[in-house]
Image: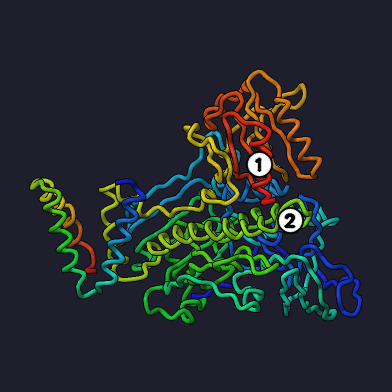
Amino acid sequence: MTEAELDTAYTHLCKTMTDLGEARASLFLARFALLAMVRIGDAGVVQGLTDDAAAGVAAGPAA
Amino acid sequence: MNRPFKPYPFTAKQYPASLPPLAGGVDRVRRPVVVVGGGPVGYCAALGLADHGVPVVLLEADDSVCFGSRAICISRRSLEIISRLGAADGFLRQGLPWTGGRSFYRDDEVLNFRMPMDENQKHPPMINLAQYSIEQLLLDAAEQKSDLIEIRWQNRVTAIDAREDGARLTVETPEGCYAVEADWVVAADGGRSFLREALGLKLKGASYEGRYLIVDIVLDTTRPVERLAYFDPPCNPGSTVLVHKQPEGVWRVDYQLRDGEDPDEAIKPENVMPRVESLLGMMGETGAWSPVWIGIYKANALTLDDYRHRRVLFAGDAAHLLPIFGVRGANSGIDDADNLAWKLALVVKGRASERLIDSYSAERVAAARENLSYGTKSTEFMAPPSFAFELMRKAVLGLAVKFPELRSLINPRQSSAIAYTTSPLNAGTQEAEFAGGPAPGTVLPECPLAITEGPSVRAGHLTDLIGPRITALYFAGDDAVPNELTACEASMLARDIPFAIVRVARKGNDRLLAMYDAAPGTLYLVRPDGHVFARWRRFDAGDVTRAVDHLLQT
């Protein structure tokens, strides 16, 4: 994925989540995470990404 | 805590009102071009027209150059334009060049970006200079051309009658009211354009709710010039702060106001000073400082659909309002003026058809839309328009230290030259034969070269060769310029079309030849604004004449 493609994907995800509304955002992100897991298709990578995503989150303020 | 304000380190000269000789309350002379608005865009348009020998009357409502914190960043592309207009020396002498910047999230540095800067460049990617200095330097250049540029201070336009063949402007001055007839009007009267309102034209697009507070201070420090961005900084949790250095010890600090924060309260000095104090403390700045200016800013992403309304041509903020992030406001306006000046000049002089003016709107509206898309992306990051953008930004900033591949999302996407790839003026039929180099519509990429002038050879840059004319860049082998091309030049000059051949010798220009994918016999045709409009591996006189006629829409 190029920088421009990442940028476009990021904006598309933000706009999609905006349209769904804050109350449904967690479910949307959970579904996205599940789809990404099966598409990645590598248990070790998925586990590593889960740990990376969690690292530092507990230390910061809640969203 | 409160601090006394200091003035800007700049004293604006004040100019008296002036009235032209009148007949029955009307300027005795019908003017070919009247420019409304003495800002950077108006001055660049006037200077560009004067370079082509077209006389201009410039009407400015105030009695001096601007006051306060406005545009502060001038891009490399703008410097190229200002160079051609003969005003770059002062910009380079007074402005502070910079090449990059850093972004921080809380205590961590999450981005260190560099703008393109290589040994091919003549100018830095960006300089910082306050708008009052920008205007003063352009005004100085305009005063050098007082034979062609007449500046009328304290001349406020209060009505316009726009017709198919010209316009009549009603002008109020402290010395009395008058009218002036013009063949063409350049509306460079800024974001709150009177002419736009008077003609009932509407900007379209998005306005963002997020507000920024702008604070200029003078600060005693030796800190280098770079763009600094602080997300959620310890000194001001939840906020975003931008810091830019300007000449003469002035620093510009932009704060994002928090959701629900009352702008009227936030702008009060007693609320601003502690924020600046804590920011400077966090940055480790201990030198003396004083406030100079406090203002408020709201991001807009708006443009007119058409920059031509009969004989009125809109440019700069009068035509489009771009977000502050990425510094496209003044820079895109200077590009508007550069695009417009040569077209209008050739039409006024009867060398091109009026359709050339329509290409101004086509090219610059497309440029504005491209600028808006970049500016909108920057704004969505810098001032998130919804919970989702806010949440995702928080995720990016928190992960960027460990995952560098996410850092491009933080990059501020600074203004750069825009290619008119779909311009109706582009010509040439041998694109498939070029593997590189600037295609029609593209600005000439900068490159050092050896310029041969008679027996002598001097070192220069490619952009030095562009002037108020069509430039034919002929890449020679060991041969002279072919007779066919010199005959073309002669026939253009006989039609009073400004045209010049520049022979690029092979010797000493290897880098240029590679960059332009040029072989002996390659020809590039370049517009007066530095954009390529045709190129060939092999050409004949008919190709060149057809491309120029197409350019001039004759």
Residue, x 42% and y 47% (percent of image)? B113
Mark 1, Cα crowd under 10 Å, few <14 / some 14-19 / many 20+, is some
Quarter of the rendering containing residue B487: top right
> Do the residues marked 1 and 2 share a common chain?
yes
Q: Nearer the viewer, residue B508 or B357?
A: B357
Chain of the residue displaying label 2: B
Mark 2, Cα crowd under 10 Å, few <14 / some 14-19 / many 20+, is some
Secondary structure, mark 2, is helix
Q: Nearer the viewer, residue A4 or B458?
A: A4
Residue type indicated by callout 1? Arg
- Residue B483 spot, x, y in % from top left: 73, 26
Residue A37 as seen in the image, left or right of residue B69? left
Looking at marks 1 and 2 on the same chain, the residue that comes earlier in the sequence is marked by 2
Q: Nearer the viewer, residue B462 or B326?
A: B462
Q: Report, in whole angstroms, how far the alpha carbon at label 1 lies from the one at label 2.
A: 18 Å
Q: Which residue is mark 1?
A: B546
Task: Look at the image and tell me whether residue B286 can be seen.
Answer: no
Residue A62 as seen in the image, left or right of residue B137? left
Task: Name above or below for residue B55 compared with residue B421.
Answer: below
- Residue B160 spot, x, y in % from top left: 72, 77
Chain of the residue displaying label 1: B
- Residue A50 spot, x, y in % from top left: 14, 54
Q: Which residue is mark 2?
A: B347
- Residue B239 spot, x, y in % from top left: 38, 67
Mark whose residue sits in front, 1 or 2: 1
Task: Look at the image and tell me whether residue B64 can be seen.
Answer: yes
Secondary structure, mark 1, is helix
Task: Name above or below for residue B342 compared with residue B438.
Answer: below
Residue type indicated by callout 2? Val
Residue occupying the far front of the picture = B542
Residue B83, label in figure: none
